[in-house]
Amino acid sequence: MTSSDTTNAIHDLLPPTPRWAFSEYERVRHRLPRGPSRPDATVPEAQPSLGPLADRFDAFVFDAFGVLNTGDRALTHAVTRFAELQQAGKPCLILSNAATASTARLLEKYRRMGFGVGESQLISSRWLLEQALADNPRQGLWGVIAPLEANPQTLGLNYLSIQGEPNANLRERMDRCDGFIFLSTRDWTRSHQALLEASLASYPRPLEVANPDLVAPRDDRLTLEPGFFSHQLADRTGITPVFYGKPYSPAFQAALDRLGNPAPERVLMVGDTLHTDILGGQSAGMGTLLVTDYGSLNGLDIGACITRSGITPDVVAPHI
């Protein structure tokens, strides 16, 4: 069975597993930031939680899914830890690859879960995309891959919704577009992907991806995200997607800007994924904490994953 066959089999028949997701991140490693060079013998420090690190850093940047919450459920102790840090005068940001919801909707979500967060403390890949589109308006007609509740009209584009039955009419809509924005995989199937692949193969056009994640933890399972399908399109059509969010440098620079541009090594990036949170944080010069009880590495041999990837966090803890 080829790599492509394996990908399709998992997509069609089974939910993605942490082991498969890790291998996929390694497969697309050439499109991720290089990261710093670290000695092979480096071993991450083990801690029971973020608590012992609170006085070592001046500010904290948190991934959301797998660190603060899974789905709409806050993780145990996450709300308390976030509040403790803020009460101690430590600036805290949430840096999320969420792409469907607006900043206002995300803010409502995290407040509803109990996190005392303000608008200036939330940076999403959707917001990064919106800023890029505002700074450099796109010309022509753009296809937006997302459900209508993602409110594509707020992107400031002349757009077509790329959704519905994967048939000749949808292919015709795709062929009319001058570029594509990938926001959400909701209702996106192998048949939709095949249509988009054929359209881009016949006439390569830009693809901008508001969520670089390959998978996301939602309750007791992982879901495939826009990054997975976009890397597949790059593999098969030769296009070069533009990614917003982690692990790419604009997301981390935006976080540092929000914090007033402190020395990056005084900021701790807290995440559950080696290839997005930890690699991106290290590339930005930040300290890094990998949490392991939830998210995309749950159940794996963390030491083996670190050795295989060469991405070594400064600290490993089961949760924050």
Image (tube, rainbow, N blue to C red):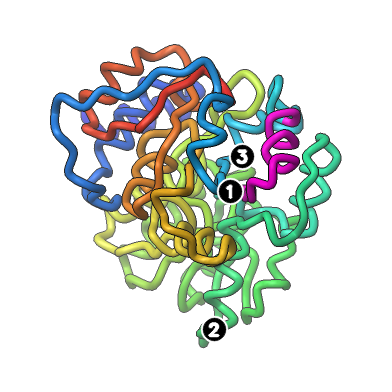
x, y percent for residue 277: 44, 42
**The quadrant where residue 183 appears:** bottom right
User: Callout 1: helix, strand or loop?
Assistant: strand
Identify the residue shown where x is 75% and y is 59%.
Answer: 119
- Residue 247 appears in the picture as rendered: yes
Please state, as top left, top right, bottom left or bottom right, where the C terminus lies in the image: top right
Task: Name the kind of residue labelled 2 in the image.
Answer: Asp
Please give the name of the residue rendered at 55% of the width and 21% of the height, measured from the top-left corner: 49
The image's mark for residue 64 is 3
Mark 2 or 3: in front is: 3
Label 3: state its secondary structure.
Answer: loop
Can see residue 193?
no
Give the percent coordinates (x, y) of residue 9.
39, 26
Q: Is residue 38 above or below residue 319?
A: below
**Is 80 contained in the magenta span?**
yes
Q: Is residue 188 above or below residue 17?
A: below
Identify the magenta region: 79-96
Query: At 48% from the left edge and 48% from the top edge, which residue is drawn?
Result: 267
Give the image location of residue 290, x and y in percent: 44, 29
Left or right relative to 111: residue 238: left
- Are the two marked residues, 1 and 3, in contact with CB atoms closer than 8 angstroms? yes
